[in-house]
Amino acid sequence: MDIESFREYCLSLPGTTEGMKWDHLCFMIEEKIYVIIAIDEGNRFSIKCNPDEFDELAARDGIEQAYHMAKRQWIQIENLEVLNDKELKSRVADSRAMVLAKLPKKTQAKYT
């Protein structure tokens, strides 16, 4: 998937906004990041993951623990080509859902 298609997909998810933080493009819901991507560094990006899947994901080529993020809860993916489009979209949607689940119930209700 190219960066523009990736951006369009992220922005298609309800409540998603984009912004820049730490010189990285971020996709957020209610100002909480669910994808952070280094567009100037080969499109390396980080997403939240289910801790139960962390070891399995981190064992795959091109995926590792995300730097400066909650240990075993965020993975860093080398580029947008590591995952096929279907898995990439699924993992981004899951990341968004995990971040949304941590927000107050009233806020969550706006997006369900």
Image: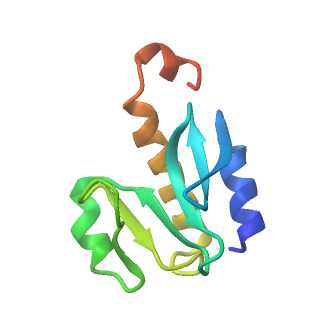
The structure residue drawn at horizontal position 51% and vertical position 45%, both measured from the top left corner, is 33
The vertical placement of 68 against 111, above or below, is below
When asked about the image quadrant of residue 42, the answer is bottom right
Q: Quadrant location of the N terminus? A: bottom right
The structure residue drawn at horizontal position 42% and vertical position 69%, both measured from the top left corner, is 76
The structure residue drawn at horizontal position 41% and vertical position 19%, both measured from the top left corner, is 104
User: Where is residue 107 shown, x and y percent of the image?
Assistant: 51, 19
User: Where is residue 34 shown, x and y percent of the image?
Assistant: 50, 48
Number of numbered discs present? Answer: 0
Residue found at the far bottom of this picture: 61
Q: Quadrant location of the C terminus? A: top right
Which residue occupies the foreground of this view, 66 or 60?
66
User: Where is residue 80 shown, x and y percent of the image?
Assistant: 59, 75
Left or right? Give the position of 97 relative to 68.
Answer: right
Left or right? Give the position of 67 relative to 14.
Answer: left
The vertical placement of 75 against 73, above or below, is below
The structure residue drawn at horizontal position 46% and vertical position 40%, both measured from the top left corner, is 97
When asked about the image quadrant of residue 30, the answer is top right
